[in-house]
Image (cartoon, rainbow, N blue to C red):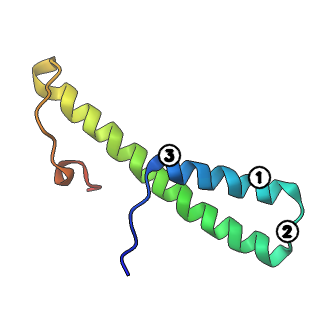
Amino acid sequence: MTKEKSTFEEDLKKLQKIVEELSSGKITLGESLKKYEEGVKIAQQCSFALAAAQRKVELLMKKDGKLSLDTVNETDIEEK
């Protein structure tokens, strides 16, 4: 069973749903803690995705101060 990687937009929607559930006050403390933990993990994934996108843009812009449309490898944008 392979877990597919979710997109930033999907993660953001999940995070918004968790926030709504937590702020509703209609779930138990145990459920709230599970949702909070899940939300923290999703927020970290979103943060990494945004950081990767920022590095990609910076790499594209660095080529002699001109916009470069060279292919950027995923290894170029991984967290170092």
Q: Residue at x 18, y 49 (%)?
A: 76
Q: Residue at x 54, y 59 (%)?
A: 42
Q: Position of residue 48 (x, y in %)?
A: 41, 52
In primary-sequence order, the first of circles 1 and 2 is 1
Q: Are marks 1 and 3 in contact (CB under 8 Å)?
A: no
How far, Cα to Cα, is label 3 from label 2? Answer: 25 Å
Asked if 29 appears above or below 49 in the picture, the reply is: below
Q: Are marks 3 and 2 in contact (CB under 8 Å)?
A: no
Q: Residue at x 89, y 60 (%)?
A: 25
Tag 1 secondary structure: helix
In primary-sequence order, the first of circles 3 and 2 is 3
The answer to which quarter of the image holds residue 50 is top left
Q: Residue at x 46, y 48 (%)?
A: 8
On residue 9, which mark appears? 3
Position of residue 25 in the picture relative to residue 34 (left or right): right
> Disc 2 designates what residue?
27
